[in-house]
């Protein structure tokens, strides 16, 4: 394996050298440099943001530069661009190209709507254009002034549903024994290997989550589109719409193609008046007057929590490593110019050890500087564990949070190995030498020790949350034991302090630092974005390049293919030309 890595590294290094030789150092300098001098924004321009495909919360751990490898724009980039657009006098408005094939979660869609509202409040129109519209895409688009679709657009508007997969039957066929202890009945992740269907508690929890999402999303769409709720529900009964049917149902405003929209806005004769979101990223907040003498650090961390270094795992996806996260938190805390820290968390949880180490760092820093949590799409289980020691927690209405509980144990896979002829023997020394062996079950004494240890560790966690959130332990148990909540429900139970997105968290950070809310501040983002110079001067440049390209394929290409397949294979035969309104 080491030989293979070395050969591959040499090949990639040669490619990089050839690249630089062919295109010259001038190109390299252009790529490395960033700032407003690299992008021209003419008066009367329109910002065009494309919500399609993979939209990660922030730069992935292996990201080098979007300008070099075509990294997908992050939600953080898009929200920042909308904030700048509202203040940029050179822009006349914003166009959102919205596709159902995007990776935005519930809270991300909510934040998009809030950012759009701020642009509109500044007096600038925001138009939505979509050729692939579903309920979630419509939820974002309905926040805009108008929604346009071409005559060949796919429009789906259906009800809500949740389907879970279960693997117990597969494990039984393979003779794999699950040895998992969960705390408690609402900690439903273990059900995938313990059951063949949803438990009553799982169904109950899923129903209360869907109910809250229904109320938030359907209520917003009905208000924005000026439709009574019963008419909106009737659209779900119809489910699939042609463009004209969608217009008649008031789901959209007008049927036209992209070039016709450009003509309508007077952009067809001068393409330079359309500024892409990726180019506009080089415009800084300071360039449009959004800066101040005071600084707030925004530390982003997302992915499954586990290990030391943040990375992209081929099987799991983005991993949040505790040493990487604490290093970024400490860098922000040690910067004397930074008055407060906003810790942006987007994680479904993961390893308890890594979560506890990050949580301790949050608590330690909180003694010196205010730390405000901004929860993204998901901040549950370990994602909640790293959040509760902060000064305050801000969650979106549709953030999925809570899941205060735990799963502990192992799988015994000996039976599966034996089916293909592999057998095992052993020699031990000392008690419990095979306790964590993956080819042995726990014996009765080991299982009882595991249960006692597990219960004690979760009780300790509950006590810490109780003290930090000022919720009596017995009351907290009724919100914990694996229960998952939306942000709205979590606030009702005092698990979070306020509802809102990153912008609200920044305002709360100002308040905690004694900065007037209406005072502009300079934002310092972590982790820092790396450019080509970093790639060429880092000790493992070729390996870094390979990891970046592989991570891109995992996050973007494979993920997009899976989303297309999950949409049900909507392949339709061409049935002839259709008319345009």
Image (cartoon, rainbow, N blue to C red):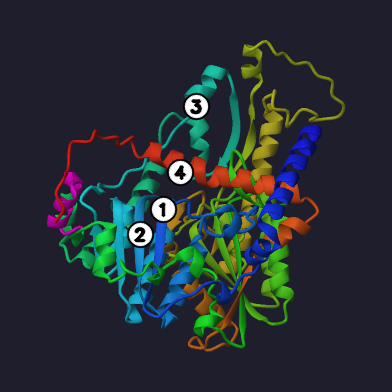
Q: Quadrant of residue 342?
A: bottom right
Q: Residue furthest left?
A: 248
Disc on the earlier residue, 3 or 1: 1
Q: Which residues are magenta?
A: 236-251
- Crowding near pointer 1: few (<14 within 10 Å), some, many (20+)? some
**Foreground: disc 3 or disc 1:** 1
**The C terminus - image quarter:** bottom left
Spatial distance from mark 3 to mark 1, Cα to Cα? 35 Å
The answer to whether marks 1 and 2 mark residues whose Cβ atoms lie closer than 8 Å is yes
Q: CA distance from mark 1 to mark 4?
A: 9 Å
Residue found at the far top of this picture = 421
- At 67% from the left and 68% from the top, the residue drawn is 363
**Label 2, residues with CA under 10 Å away: few <14, some 14-19, many ≥20:** many
Gap between marks 2 and 3, in whole Å? 42 Å
Instruction: Kindly identify which residue carries mark 1.
Output: 52
Q: Earlier in the sequence, mark 4 or mark 3?
A: 3
Q: Which label was assigned to residue 168?
A: 3
Marks 1 and 2 sit apart, C-alpha to C-alpha, by: 8 Å
Q: Check residue 264 for magenta coloring.
A: no
Which one is earlier in the sequence, the residue at label 2 or at label 4?
A: 2
- Give the residue pinned by disc 4: 560
- Disc marking residue 97: 2
Circle 4: element type: helix
Q: What residue do we see at 50% from left, 63% from top?
A: 278
In x, y percent, where is residue 379? 52, 57
């Amino acid at each position: 394996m080491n030989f293979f890595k070395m050969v591959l590294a040499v090949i990639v290094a040669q490619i990089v050298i050839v690249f630089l030789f062919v295109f010259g150092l001038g190109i390299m300098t252009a790529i490395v440099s960033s700032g407003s001098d690299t992008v021209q924004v003419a008066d009367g321009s329109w910002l065009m943001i494309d919500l399609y495909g993979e939209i990660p919360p922030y730069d992935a751990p292996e990201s080098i530069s979007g300008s070099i490898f075509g990294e997908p724009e992050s939600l953080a980039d898009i929200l920042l661009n909308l904030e700048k657009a509202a203040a940029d006098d050179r822009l006349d408005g914003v166009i959102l190209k919205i596709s159902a094939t995007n990776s935005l979660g519930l809270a991300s869609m909510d934040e998009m709507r809030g950012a759009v509202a701020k642009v509109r409040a500044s007096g600038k129109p925001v138009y939505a254009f979509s050729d692939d519209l579903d309920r979630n895409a419509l939820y974002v688009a309905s926040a805009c002034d108008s929604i346009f679709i071409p005559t060949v657009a796919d429009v789906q508007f259906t009800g809500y549903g949740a389907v879970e997969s279960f693997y117990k039957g597969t494990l039984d066929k393979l003779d794999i024994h699950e040895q998992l202890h969960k705390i408690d009945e609402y900690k439903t992740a273990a059900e995938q290997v313990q059951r063949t269907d949803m438990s009553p508690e799982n169904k109950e929890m899923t129903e209360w989550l869907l109910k809250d999402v229904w109320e938030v999303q359907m209520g917003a769409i009905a208000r924005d589109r000026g439709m009574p709720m019963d008419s909106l529900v009737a659209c779900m009964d119809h489910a699939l719409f042609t463009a004209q049917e969608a217009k008649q149902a008031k789901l959209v405003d007008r049927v036209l193609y992209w070039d016709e929209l450009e003509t309508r806005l007077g952009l067809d004769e001068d393409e330079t008046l359309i500024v892409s979101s990726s180019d506009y990223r080089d415009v800084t907040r300071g360039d449009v007057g959004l800066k101040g003498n005071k600084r707030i650090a925004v530390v982003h961390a997302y992915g499954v929590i586990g290990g030391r270094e943040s990375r992209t795992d081929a099987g799991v996806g983005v991993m949040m490593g505790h040493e990487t996260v604490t290093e970024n938190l400490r860098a922000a805390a040690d910067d004397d110019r930074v008055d407060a820290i906003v810790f942006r968390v987007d994680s479904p949880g993961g390893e308890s050890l890594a979560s506890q180490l990050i949580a301790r760092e949050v608590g330690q820093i909180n003694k010196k500087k205010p730390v405000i949590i901004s929860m993204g799409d998901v901040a549950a289980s370990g994602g909640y564990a790293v959040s509760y020691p902060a000064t305050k927690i801000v969650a979106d209405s549709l953030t999925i949070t809570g899941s205060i509980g735990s799963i502990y144990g192992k799988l015994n896979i000996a039976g599966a190995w034996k089916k293909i002829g592999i057998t095992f023997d052993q020699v031990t020394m000392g008690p419990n030498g095979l306790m964590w062996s993956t080819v042995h079950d726990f014996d009765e004494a080991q299982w009882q020790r595991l249960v006692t240890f597990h219960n004690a560790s979760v009780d300790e966690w509950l006590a810490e949350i109780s003290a930090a959130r000022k919720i009596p332990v017995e009351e907290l148990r009724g919100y914990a034991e694996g229960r998952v909540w939306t942000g709205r429900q979590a606030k009702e139970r005092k698990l979070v302090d306020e509802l809102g997105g990153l912008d609200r968290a920044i305002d709360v950070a100002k308040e905690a630092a004694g900065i007037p809310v209406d005072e502009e501040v300079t934002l310092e983002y972590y982790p820092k974005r790396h450019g080509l110079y970093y790639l060429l001067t880092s000790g493992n440049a070729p390996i870094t390049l390979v990891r970046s390209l592989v991570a891109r394929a995992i996050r973007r290409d494979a993920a997009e293919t899976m989303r297309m397949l999950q949409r049900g294979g909507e392949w339709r035969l061409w049935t002839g030309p259709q008319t345009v309104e």
